[in-house]
Image (cartoon, rainbow, N blue to C red):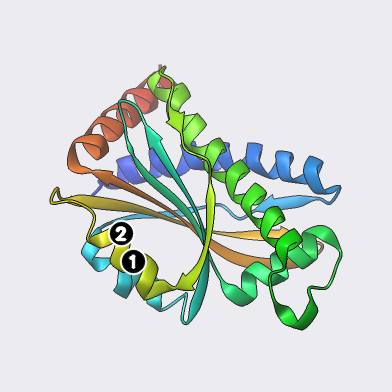
Amino acid sequence: MILTERQNDALAELINIAFARTAAALSELTGHRVSLKAPEVSVHPTEELPLVLSRFLPGDAASIHQLFVGPVSGDAFLLLNYDGAVRLTNLLTEEQSPANTLDESAREVLTEVGNILLNACLGMFGNLLNVRFSFSVPRLHLETLDEMLDSLISKGDALHYALVISTAFNVRDSAVSGYLVIVLTVASLDRLMQEVEAWEERQGT
């Protein structure tokens, strides 16, 4: 499934609104000004994710994973490479993790960042659809990208697509790149894009 330029622009605009709310929430949480770069959005079959993401996330990765259920159901992930995850938690807490590792405190901070970001984006979709989503508790995973993607790609027999949303966290004049990946079945992606188009049409009236 390939998005039209108009669909892509409308989806990016919606996510940008959600990211602005996310940045405000993170700023309040940390006491630092946090901004998020305007997102770049692309859609890929899940089998292509290893090729798409491996260029940006070599080696070990930190992922915050949350399931959501509703008219649009799927899996949402915030992905950071391991070093970027350490740097982001250091920037947000003004503490230096020993030996560049994610200790228990850093993991809690990272999970909360993922929780805020994922809920802001999924909440925006919920407002768009005028429905409520049910969310699972977000979970932090530290593993190689291949391990994470293998478990994702092998999930069920239905064809799945992934919305890949790239951004950068800017905290205290430093930037850390991250990727929001939302995996949907064809039916859920179709439903989402119908609502995105309806929203975009309402903006023009």
Q: Is residue 60 above or below residue 165?
A: below
Q: Is residue 20 above or below residue 41?
A: above
| Residues packed near mark 1 inside 10 Å, few (<14), some (14 to 19) or many (20 plus) | some
Q: Position of residue 108 (x, y in %)?
A: 69, 54
Visible residue check, residue 16? yes
| Residues packed near mark 2 inside 10 Å, few (<14), some (14 to 19) or many (20 plus) | some
Q: Nearer the viewer, residue 173 or 90?
A: 90
Q: Nearer the viewer, residue 76 or 129?
A: 76
Q: Tell which residue pokes out farthest to the left in this image.
A: 157
Tag 1 residue = 149
Residue displayed at 55% across by 62% down: 178
Task: Judge left or right: residue 81 versus residue 184.
Answer: right
Q: Is residue 74 above or below residue 124?
A: below
Q: Are marks 1 and 2 in contact (CB under 8 Å)?
A: yes
Q: Position of residue 59 (x, y in %)?
A: 48, 82
Q: Tell which residue pokes out farthest to the front in this image.
A: 104
Q: Position of residue 145 (x, y in %)?
A: 41, 72
Number of numbered discs overlaid on the protein picture: 2
Task: Judge left or right: residue 183 versus residue 21.
Answer: left
Residue type, numbered disc 1: Leu
Q: Position of residue 84 (x, y in %)?
A: 63, 72
Residue type, numbered disc 2: Leu
Q: Is residue 23 above or below residue 81?
A: above
Visible residue check, residue 171? no
Where disc 1 sits, the SS reads helix
Q: Nearer the viewer, residue 144 or 116?
A: 144
Q: Nearer the viewer, residue 91 or 97?
A: 97
Task: Judge left or right: residue 93 versus residue 191.
Answer: right
Which image quarter: residue 16?
A: top right
Quadrant location of the C terminus in the rendered image? top left
Q: Which mark is residue 152?
A: 2
